[in-house]
Amino acid sequence: EVRLVQSGAEVKKPGESLKISCKVSGYSFSEYWIGWVRQMPGKGLEWMGVIYPGDSDTRYSPSFQGQVTISADKSISTAYLQWSSLKASDTAMYYCARHLSQLRWGWFDPWGQGTLVTVSS
Amino acid sequence: QSVLTQPPSASGTPGQRVTISCSGSSSNIGSNTVNWYLQLPGTAPKLLIETNNQRPSGVPDRFSGSKSGTSASLAISGLQSEDEADYYCAAWDDSLNGVVFGGGTKLTVL
């Protein structure tokens, strides 16, 4: 069974750094893109970017380029999303998902359960 | 403002057929495939339709997708109360070089 298990909820202060994780099992981690999607409270889904763990090729949405860093550790089949300086506007649920097929033609399946990040002073 | 445009809400009674539209442009739906995701309240999104009209294993045949030009549609027939959820369309956008989502449609079963 393919599973993506994300790290637990986080409560942080503005300016703090954070790294959340997405551990996968049930398939070869290196062979599929992994993406990150943001959902702000009461809002829709926003694509943040993807990484190909096999060679660490990473693509970012223009909206998130420079705001976050996506990385992966093949040795432990885990993808990461990190911030160096959080803002209150980063408060959201963050999902990781496996991207099947080529980027232009592909789709996300399955999804992780989500990590809720709350940034408040 | 989402790149793909969906109606914010839709509704129907049990047993009815409902369609949800998704409008894009030549740089996304017009040149790439469309996927649909279902998000039940308080849960992670789940794949519903991939590559315009393909149902993954386990998705009932009550759900169907179609695409024409720069628009796509999701149809749900034999509406059931458990279909109450948010539905999102998505496609790759060649101009933005990334995935774009619709704003989501909240389906209410009356």
Image: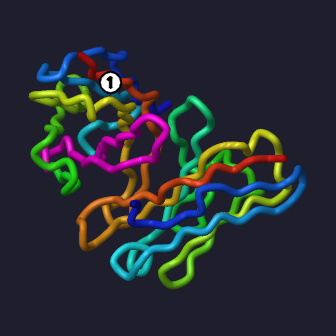
Q: Disc 1 designates what residue?
A: A117
Q: Nearer the viewer, residue A54 or A93?
A: A93
Magenta stretch, residue numbers: A32-57
Chain bearing tag 1 is A
- Predominant SS of the magenta segment: strand
Single out the residue that lies furthest toward the front.
Answer: A121
What residue appears at the point 10 percent right and 45 percent down from the top-left corner?
A66
Q: How many marks?
A: 1
Question: The C terminus of chain A is located in which quarter?
Answer: top left
**Could you tell me if residue B52 is visible in this image?**
yes
A69 horizontally vs B109: left or right:
left
Residue type beneath disc 1: Val
Q: Tell me residue A71's x, y (percent).
A: 16, 36
Q: Nearer the viewer, residue A74 or B86?
A: B86
Q: Nearer the viewer, residue B57 or B46?
A: B46
Q: Tell me residue B41's x, y (percent).
A: 61, 33
What residue appears at the point 31 percent right and 41 percent down from the top-left corner?
A36
A94 horizontally vs A19: left or right:
right
Q: Tell me residue B31's x, y (percent).
A: 38, 79
Q: Tell me residue B64's x, y (percent).
A: 68, 64
